[in-house]
Image (cartoon, helix red, strand yellow):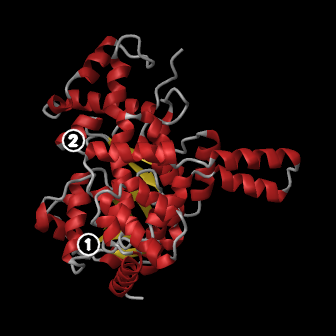
Amino acid sequence: MDMAFLGELLTSVADRGRALIGFERFIGNRARPIDRLCEDLLSGRGEASGMALAQAVLDAWEQLDKPGRLAFFNLLKERFGPDQAGLDAAIEAYRENPNAAAISALHLAAEPRRQELLRRLNLAPEGTHVLVRMREALFEAIAAEPELKAIDDDFRHLFGSWFNRGFLVLRRIDWRSPANVLEKIIRYEAVHEIQGWDDLRRRLEPADRRCFAFFHPQLVDEPLIFVEVALTTEIPRSIGELLEPERTVLPAQEATTAVFYSISNCQEGLRGISFGNFLIKQVAEDLKRELPGLDTFVTLSPVPGLARWLSAAVAEGGEVALTNEERSELARPAVEAISLDDPAKARRDKLLGQMTAEYMLRARTTSGRVIDPVARFHLGNGARLERINVGGNLSARGLRESHGVMVNYRYDLDDIETNHEAFATRNTVVASSSVRKLLRPAAG
């Protein structure tokens, strides 16, 4: 069904609902507060009337200022939790007879009323889009009042179902895609900034470039996440070689390697709802069908936590055994290291490679997790840490976050499940022998 037609249909149904319930009562009458609108929406009106009420609530919410939105989230927490009397009765019934029916009744009674409220708000035209923006505002509210996290638990529960992979549509983005979609690719690129339309064209139009995005039927022309791909004949060591404006374009049929060099989430309100694992695997499978000559699938990825970890590691008493000379070298500002003479630069690069291997393979958070968030993402998806590239990103951001280091993760389609299980169950970082050889002897 055409999405524009569907949107018009939903709007006409909502308009009919407005007429049925005297919509002016809810929008025109400022005496009708948003909490009453929410209660009316939960009261069980007909579907058309419910859509109109949902629209009334969302319209009222969008008019709220920051303090008003904070008050709204507190309203959800305090007045739209579980029905306590119903929950007590369900608990008592379960204690008396813990059968399947009692368990089901207890499950329903334990659900906060705000979950059903959010479901009904989603009935409004553009309801999904507004709820995504509502969750963005919730993140800011949680920073001020952490107890509001319970509200976010409800959003995550519902969004996990609404944005299930089965509802997502994979689309290729190219230079012929609608301008409003291309503008969003420029705006949402979070790894390697796109410097205007000419730069975007270099990433989309050549035969050896691809871009794919997931879309949701309720968020028309709003990408959820997208990945940029370079088709090459070898695994790249630096982002510069992929983004070089004057590079020679490779005919797609000659490519043997697909490089995922940028993955960007587009909707802050969907933070924590995982799409990337599905995206990479789907794109790899689609590219393999299109170009059977592709036999290597890798990333060229940032290491955003490395510089911060190194700062702690070089401090006296750090966990890594270092000589004073090594500490001094690693404490040198990364931007200064670019101008070192060749022997000094070679010594520093070797040390930086060793420390990156230490960071990736041995360093852990206090809870035992791999520190680097990008590493957790790719390793959790079943990738293997393939290579460490010192000097892979000499941009200001790359130097600031990782002293210029980038890494390659390799997606071997035959080993993805095995690697995923190793990481998920034992926290094992599957790495190539070349990476493991960089490790220094364990301290102590």
- In-front residue for pair 347/360: 360
- N-terminal-most mark, 2 or 1: 1
Q: Quadrant of residue 145?
A: top left
Name which residue lies at 41% across and 67% down: 54
Residue type for callout 2: Arg
Task: Give the x, y percent position of residue 380.
Answer: 53, 49
Q: Which mark is residue 397?
A: 2
Q: Quadrant of the C terminus?
A: top right
Q: In this view, does 349 lie to the left or right of 125?
A: left
SS label for mark 2: helix
Which residue is rendered at x = 43% and y = 73% of the image? 51
Disc 2 versus disc 1: nearer the observer = 2
Q: Residue 416 location in percent, x, y?
A: 57, 58
Tell me, yes or no, if residue 93 can be seen here.
yes
Q: Which of 128 and 94 is in front in this view?
A: 94
Distance in Å between CA atoms under marks 2 and 1: 28 Å
Is residue 259 shown to the viewer in this render?
no
